[in-house]
């Protein structure tokens, strides 16, 4: 299992009616699923919903008690396909992933499930990775909801409300025979809060019971003529049913006065930010007593025409606060208003930015522009305060691009690539998704494109080299997600001649250290230890090599050099294997502490730099970039440039020393091995050596003293 | 109605414990009957990037929960906590620090960003500018080196920051409430309380500041030193004394008294009395004359003082066994450098011989200095000092130094500023092996350009800086030409 334990979180999942749950947004969703009597859960980890997967993975006992099935799906496509269980049976099912990337991967299955429709409630929980801190392309999940006609919930950030929306989401899905998406933005996933729990519910039917009494309805299968039937059914039955449900259960909310000349329509997820912006303009208070009518769309798709008509009627203008682009809601509102025969002006992206995150300041400024145009009596003064000159220029504060962790086993792979490039010139490098993508940033600057998870090799497939081969990078996570077929199988079939470096660190590391098929850890609930090299040979790769210690920079460099210069044709694969250091430290730290405590001999290794031989060129840092390898003021009064320095956070991986060896840099690096709980042999040897060396040193010191200044 | 909400932004680097600190603050609020909410944007930031945690709290009054925001609005942040100096700068840049309301609590230590670390020379950002901005922009600024405090108290920086937050008085809670939050966390409680205590004292200005150490006096220990010091006093302007003394001391240590005298002779041969010129020449001449050959490296590696420094660096307890292994990679070139000049030169000149010998030096060596075998070998090598004047490297370096001094002497009388810039060109020659070769090539190119181009001091400085910043030394010709010509 993943090396981090979520025991405490799992315990919270057990609490019953009336007890108060404390925790993050995404964990509240986890509890809400159990309260909804969900029969099965699947998904693929990724920020910001990893916790949901992690906690369920650690909760196997509780899940067994409840009769709920959980699996860590191989990919989002696999997770979405799992929802097929709700087509014929009244099984409630939920899947979760990072969006939009995961939704992209899942699209095929999602289109199918949305076409045929569902019997049991199905919920797709999406971590919308948009705005600050996002690591992916900036797109909207909204488009997927629209194109497949799946309903999209965007709940107001309040834990009790989110929990409620999960349960209502299942009901909506069942009422309209349509899968429902629940979108949570990054901050809502990580937002702390509390809510009063309800009891967990056993599913009314379990997946085992469903399998025992199969039911079949050919009309639910996407094949002619049913596929044409589905489209009509969506429009004539499911859509009206959904709108009816949203309206009668009042999933959307109103704040502020009932009437007004102007009003605001906002996505539920942005409500708190909007209220803050209103507060800053003196138009609301901390308890959301807004002075303007506000209509909150906790369901952003579909819109409810009657509600929209009622809200807009009698208003001269309505501001729609809709994050991201294209502005689907704004377009739809214009249509609805015009169909209703109203002359309300819908104002949206003409006062708010077309792109980028809607922060408090952005909404405040857009709102101010809206008010100036439509309700000057509410508007703030034109120039609130003359903004003072910036105290600092942007260049005064250095950027901190993401980088590899201290002791990361991926670093030496890219150090080795840098060394090979020094010899053979630059290569076209097709990068992949994962921590290894940080290679594109300083200090490595390696990588030309990234086309998606597990698609590193496919991204290099157009390159059919004459002399110089292209290099593709792939992580072990991406490899099992789809890279084995889309990358390696494809390369074999199409007779590629490129090199793929598969980074095998034993975990899906970038998403939080989850297990994958090639993980080394024994896992009671999963089958691990399936070697990657065996898999690539299985699909027909002839040239494959596993390097078992990536920290051996010279071996890594030689293997890469051999792969790109070998006369052998066909795809070449290097499996670069060493355990993710973040997870390794988590694993071994308690073990070491225990060993030390019990008096066993432990050797702690760490590295250092001698400041008197370091000349301050920092070539070592340009080839490594380890966080623990840094600089400090030069202690030599004659020298000006800072010297390299290893901090105590060093985990002794040895890359700095190996790099300095392989690149012939300098003799300043040393490894210090500190012996804890030494044996009598250690002590004896140390005393003898110490005596002899000490005598020699004292003699040398005396001679040096004689010629001292 | 007066504003009751408290907004707190915490900026730090991934791994600094910002989440723990945010949890404590939320806990603190909840214990005091506030509605508190924390949130964060970790994303890829957990891998060495910047993280922002954001906490809001409000007194619980009545049945309706307040609506709390999920992100700070510029101009609306009451407390900014920065776990590193540049993160404080980032908070200022983002507009979170304003004079009408913000208490800024920042650790003033530095964790250097990759661009600062990887610059070939000195790429560090200015600390002064951020400190000035912090004092100017915050309503209250509390800043001290909390990293050092956490180290001293064997705690973590988040507990020191939490202590400083308590000590700042910016939150309406008693000190005991803060301590209760730490206890409720249940992890490393004693260490965290120690850090908290020190942070609290620091915020109230009650931590003893370390006295800045006075510059070392120009003192001597032996007869040789007295004679050299006397010469420095008579031969050189005051401005050059500190570096000249340090230089003479270095060269006594490096070689012998004659070598140190030779150093002063070379300085005296510069006919200018320009303080800046002689100061810089004293600095760079000493560094060049104490070039790092294998003899010097061996000598530095085996000293008792060096092993003591290593023990301190790795935080070894007294009596603990520490074994030290060096990563050395002497190539054939470095070996020949240490041989008698004629022999070394002839080996390098013979492709057949050097080709055969090369393979013995193709691999790096792991040299365990604390083993008797390697210690003796390094001692032997260090002992070659007495024959250093006969080595190939010595001959090469003295020739280079003389040529360089010749240029400085020529320029000294007519343009001391230009001569000073020439002296500083020694900076380009750094490191060992490939790095050294690259540095020397850069130096040669700069000097060649100088000879051809009749550059003035400003042009030469720009040229040198461009060459230094060109990390791989790959395509400097064009750059250098352009920079040099653009004056």
Image (cartoon, coloured by chain):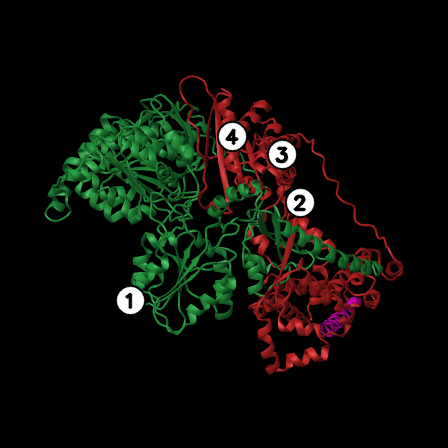
Q: Name the residue under label 4.
A: B185
Residue pushed farthest front? A680
- Seen from the viewer's position, the closer of residues A647 and A319 is A647
Mark 2 or 3: in front is 2
Query: What span is in magenta?
Result: B393-412
- Compared with A591, B163 (above or below) is above
Q: Mark 1 points at which residue?
A: A494
Q: Are marks 1 and 2 on the same chain?
A: no
Q: Main secondary structure of the magenta part?
A: helix
Mark 2 lies on a secondary structure that is loop
Q: Hey, which quadrant is residue A252 in on the image? A: top left
Mark 1 or 4: in front is 4
Place of residue A101 in the rendered image (x, y in percent of width and height, measured from the top left) = 34, 48
Q: How far apart are marks 2 and 3 (CA)?
A: 37 Å
Q: Do labels 1 and 4 share a chain?
A: no
Q: Are marks 4 and 3 in contact (CB under 8 Å)?
A: no
Q: Hey, which quadrant is residue A391 in on the image? A: top right
Q: Name the residue under label 3.
A: B141
Q: Distance between the residues labelled 1 and 2?
A: 61 Å
First-in-chain label (2 vs 4): 4
Q: Do the residues labelled 1 and 3 touch (CB within 8 Å)?
A: no
Quick one: quadrant of the N terminus of chain A? top left
Place of residue A366 in the rendered image (x, y in percent of width and height, measured from the top left) = 41, 36
């Amino acid at each position: 299992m993943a090396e981090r334990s979520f025991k405490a979180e799992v315990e919270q999942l057990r609490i019953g009616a009336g007890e108060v749950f404390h925790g993050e947004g995404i964990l509240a969703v986890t509890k809400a699923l159990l309260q909804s009597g969900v029969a099965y859960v699947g998904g693929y980890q990724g920020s910001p919903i990893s916790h949901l997967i992690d906690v369920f993975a650690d909760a196997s006992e509780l899940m067994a008690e409840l009769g709920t099935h959980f699996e860590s799906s191989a990919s989002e496509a696999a997770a979405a396909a799992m929802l097929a269980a709700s087509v014929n049976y009244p099984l409630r099912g939920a899947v979760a992933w990072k969006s939009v990337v995961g939704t992209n991967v899942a699209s095929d299955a999602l289109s199918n499930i949305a076409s045929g429709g569902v019997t049991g409630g199905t919920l797709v929980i999406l971590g919308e990775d948009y705005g600050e801190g996002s690591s992916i392309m900036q797109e909207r999940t909204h488009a997927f909801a629209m194109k497949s006609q799946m309903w999209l919930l965007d709940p107001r950030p309040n834990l009790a409300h989110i929990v409620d929306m999960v349960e209502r989401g299942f009901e909506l899905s069942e009422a309209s025979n349509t899968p429902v998406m629940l979108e949570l933005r990054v901050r809502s996933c990580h937002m702390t809060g509390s809510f009063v729990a309800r009891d967990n519910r056993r599913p009314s039917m379990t997946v085992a019971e469903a399998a025992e009494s199969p039911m079949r309805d050919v009309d639910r299968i996407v094949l002619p003529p049913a596929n044409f039937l589905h489209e009509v059914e969506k429009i004539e039955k499911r859509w009206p049913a959904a709108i009816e449900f949203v309206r009668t259960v009042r999933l959307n909310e109103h704040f502020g006065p009932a009437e007004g000349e102007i009003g605001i329509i906002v996505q539920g997820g942005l409500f708190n930010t909007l209220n803050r912006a209103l507060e800053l303009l003196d138009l609301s208070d901390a308890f959301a007593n807004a002075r303007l009518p506000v209509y909150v769309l906790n369901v952003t798709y579909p819109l409810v025409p009657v509600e929209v008509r009622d809200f807009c009627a009698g208003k001269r203008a309505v501001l729609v606060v809709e994050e991201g682009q294209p502005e689907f809601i704004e377009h739809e509102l214009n249509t609805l208003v015009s169909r209703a025969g109203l002359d309300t002006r819908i104002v949206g992206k003409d006062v708010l930015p077309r792109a980028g995150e809607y922060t408090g300041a952005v909404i405040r400024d857009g709102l101010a522009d809206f008010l100036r145009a439509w309700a000057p009596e509410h508007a703030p003064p034109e120039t609130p305060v003359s903004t003072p000159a910036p105290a600092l220029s942007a260049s005064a504060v250095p950027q901190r691009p993401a980088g590899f962790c201290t002791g990361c086993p991926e670093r030496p792979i890219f150090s080795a690539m840098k060394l090979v490039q020094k010899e053979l010139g630059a290569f076209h490098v097709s990068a992949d998704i994962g921590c290894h993508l940080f290679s594109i940033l300083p200090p490595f600057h390696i990588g030309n494109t990234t086309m998606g998870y597990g698609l590193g090799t496919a991204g290099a497939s157009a390159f059919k080299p004459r002399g110089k081969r292209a290099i593709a990078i792939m992580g072990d996570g991406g490899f099992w997600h789809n890279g084995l077929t889309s990358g390696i199988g494809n390369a074999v079939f199409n007779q590629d001649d490129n090199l793929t470096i598969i980074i095998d660190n034993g975990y899906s590391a970038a998403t939080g250290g989850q297990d994958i098929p090639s993980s080394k850890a024994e896992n009671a609930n999963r089958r691990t230890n399936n070697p990657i090299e065996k898999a690539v040979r299985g699909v027909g790769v002839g040239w494959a090599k596993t390097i078992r210690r990536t920290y051996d920079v010279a071996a890594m460099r030689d293997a890469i050099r051999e792969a790109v210069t070998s006369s052998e044709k066909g795809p070449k694969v290097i499996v670069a294997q060493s355990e993710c250091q973040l997870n390794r430290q988590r694993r071994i730290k308690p073990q070491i502490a225990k060993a030390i405590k019990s008096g066993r001999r432990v050797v702690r290794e760490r590295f250092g730099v001698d400041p008197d031989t370091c000349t301050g060129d920092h070539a070592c840092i340009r080839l490594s970039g380890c966080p623990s390898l840094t600089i400090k003021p030069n202690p030599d009064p004659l020298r000006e440039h800072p010297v390299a320095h290893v901090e105590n956070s060093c985990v002794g991986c040895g890359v700095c020393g190996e790099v300095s060896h392989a690149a012939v840099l300098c003799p300043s690096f040393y490894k210090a091995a500190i012996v804890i709980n030494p044996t009598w042999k250690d002590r004896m040897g140390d005393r003898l050596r110490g005596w002899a060396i000490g005598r020699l040193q004292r003699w040398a010191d005396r001679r040096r003293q004689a010629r001292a200044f | 109605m007066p504003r009751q909400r408290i907004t707190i932004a915490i900026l730090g680097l991934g791994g600094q414990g910002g989440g723990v600190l945010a949890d404590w603050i939320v806990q603190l609020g909840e214990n005091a009957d506030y509605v508190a909410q924390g949130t964060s944007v970790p994303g890829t930031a957990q891998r060495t990037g910047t993280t922002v945690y954001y906490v809001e709290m409000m007194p619980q009054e009545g049945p309706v929960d307040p609506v709390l925001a999920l992100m700070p609005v510029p101009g609306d942040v009451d407390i900014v906590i920065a776990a590193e100096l540049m993160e404080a700068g980032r908070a200022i840049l983002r507009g979170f620090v304003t004079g009408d309301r913000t208490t800024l609590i920042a650790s003033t230590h530095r964790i250097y960003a990759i661009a600062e670390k990887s610059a070939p020379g000195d790429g560090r950002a200015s600390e002064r500018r951020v400190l000035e901005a912090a004092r100017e922009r915050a309503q209250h600024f509390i800043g001290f080196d909390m990293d050092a405090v956490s180290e001293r108290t064997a705690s973590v920086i988040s507990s020191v920051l939490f202590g400083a937050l308590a000590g700042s008085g910016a939150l309406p809670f008693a000190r005991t409430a803060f301590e209760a939050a730490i206890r409720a966390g249940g992890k490393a409680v004693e260490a965290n309380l120690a850090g908290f205590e020190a942070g609290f004292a620091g915020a109230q200005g009650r931590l003893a500041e370390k006295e800045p150490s006075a510059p070392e006096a120009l003192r001597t220990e032996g007869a040789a030193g007295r004679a050299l010091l006397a010469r420095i006093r008579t031969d050189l302007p005051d401005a050059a004394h500190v570096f000249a003394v340090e230089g003479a001391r270095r060269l006594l240590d490096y070689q012998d008294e004659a070598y140190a005298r030779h150093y002063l002779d070379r300085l005296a041969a510069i006919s200018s009395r320009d303080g800046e010129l002689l100061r810089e020449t004293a600095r760079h001449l000493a560094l060049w004359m104490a070039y790092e050959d294998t003899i010097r490296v061996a000598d530095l590696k085996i000293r008792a003082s060096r092993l003591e420094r290593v023990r301190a660096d790795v935080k070894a307890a007294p009596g603990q066994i520490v074994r030290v292994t060096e990563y050395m990679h002497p190539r054939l070139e470095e070996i020949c450098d240490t041989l008698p000049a004629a022999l070394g030169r002839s080996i390098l000149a013979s492709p057949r011989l050097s080709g055969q010998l090369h393979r013995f030096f193709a691999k790096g060596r792991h040299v365990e200095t604390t083993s008797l075998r390697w210690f003796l070998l390094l001692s032997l090598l260090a002992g070659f000092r007495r024959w250093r004047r006969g080595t190939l490297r010595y001959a090469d370096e003295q020739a280079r130094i003389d040529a360089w001094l010749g240029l400085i002497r020529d320029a000294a009388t007519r343009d001391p500023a230009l001569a000073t810039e020439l002296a500083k060109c020694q900076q380009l020659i750094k490191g060992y092996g490939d790095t050294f070769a690259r540095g020397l090539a850069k130096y040669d190119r700069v000097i060649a350009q100088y000879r051809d181009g009749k550059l003035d001091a400003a042009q030469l400085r720009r040229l040198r800086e461009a060459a230094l910043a060109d990390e791989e030394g790959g395509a400097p010709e064009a750059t250098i030409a352009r920079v040099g010509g653009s004056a």
